Amino acid sequence: MLYKQFFILIFASFIWANNLPIVSSIEFKGHKITKDYIIKREIQHPLDIPLDSSLADQDKDRLLNLGIFADVSWRMVPLADLTVILQYNLIESSLRILPAASPTYEEEYGWSFGGMFMIRNFRGKNENLTFAGSTGARRSYFLSFNNPWIMGDHVSLRFMTGKSNTMHPFLDYEQNTLTSEIIFGRYFGYKHKASIGFELERKTFTSKIDTLEYISINPLGSYSYDTRDVYRDPSKGLLITQGFFSILDLEKDMNNLWWVQSYSIYHTINNSIKKLTAAFNMSFLTTFGDIDEVFVSWLGGAENVRGWSIPNHSIHSNLDNKFRFGNHSAVFSAELRQTIIPTQVFATELMDWKQEYGLTLVGFFDLGYTSRKKEDLFSHLPMIGIGFGFRVPFPMAGTVGLDYGWGYRNGSFIDQALHLVVGQKF
């Protein structure tokens, strides 16, 4: 049998020297939990055509973008009739069921201790089911369910309900939020994605002097054009996102609309396995309607201008810092991402444990403006942040890491901050 396979391979190599082999069959193996149809619907290489490595790589990227596989590879298996089997080899992430309890840190609020029970790839259908709670700076609990393809052609469903209690980052209020949301989404092809839904919410802000209460229904939605190859660490492509969030108060005339735009581009500079990628992003926030002070946004922190700490009560009360607060904002970010250890999968012999490891260093530059009035957005000096950080692959979150930066404005470095980063900033 071994001799026969060797003869087929040698003979086929002469035939394939001038002609690509025909794919007569497609197989996949290595999965234990994931249902076959979840994998089949991501594989689009046709049968009975010459093997196209670019199409096979696209199938590989789509399978990786599901977020449930630690690694995906493909190979061709020669057959006696000189055709080949296109075979995809899958390694599922071992961290599928995650009961966890640990300290957590949020820049806006501080340290909490949380517990979580998450089932990733629930029922083998790429669903996520999570129940979590925390105490400390954030006292909360929530239940969420997500199915990225619940019916039809890429129709998704996300549901969440929960309660949260924190202190306001820079105002003397304790904020209590009770919320439930349901969101439907759909892919149109693999580049165009849209979602629509609504949120029922009750927010209460309590201080020693007064109490503010908002009971609202909040329509929300988004559209994105996405040509990235791999979502976790793109090497190339575009990501354009438009989103809106509206608060329709049911008790008082305080309705408003938040419009968010984001434009990202990715380009790998070299062809090495230790790739160097340049990434750029521009994002804009615009609001319409009445915005109470408790909902005012700010610049500073891991999500916009790094190197600046989250503003506190003393920063907010100082009128010299009004350049940090507003309902309208524009932020430009640039990153150089250098792979030091390419993402790989390790396994132990004592238990069936397979997980990714890797390391990427990041250098970043952020520049941002914000203001209360749209016409004043670019009327003052920008906030600038520069620094460096690292990313490591992490199941469910994609990547985690730390960024350290310095905040610069008006000719001097004003602030510095260390940021915990879950996922990529963009």
Image (cartoon, rainbow, N blue to C red):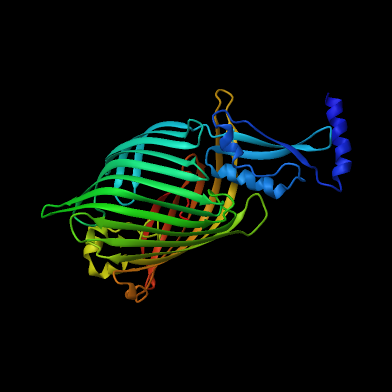
Q: Residue at x 55, y 40 (%)?
A: 357
Can you give x and y, in whole percent of width and height, for residue 209 in the image? 10, 55
Residue 423 can be seen in this image: no
For residue 224, above or below residue 139: below
Q: Residue furthest left?
A: 209
Residue 58 can be seen in this image: yes
Pick whichever, 24 or 271, lies toward us. 24
Q: Say how many tags the image has.
A: 0
Q: Residue furthest front?
A: 152
**Residue 56 as seen in the image, left or right of residue 376:** right
Pick whichever, 339 or 252, lies toward us. 252
For residue 115, above or below residue 148: above
Can you give x and y, in whole percent of width and height, for residue 410 in the image? 37, 73
For residue 176, above or below residue 141: below
**Residue 248 as seen in the image, left or right of residue 64:** left
Q: Residue at x 88, y 42 (%)?
A: 15
Can you give x and y, in whole percent of width and height, for residue 337 in the image? 55, 55
Can you give x and y, in whole percent of width and height, for residue 69 in the image? 56, 37
Pick whichever, 153 or 387, lies toward us. 153
Q: Residue at x 55, y 24 (%)?
A: 351
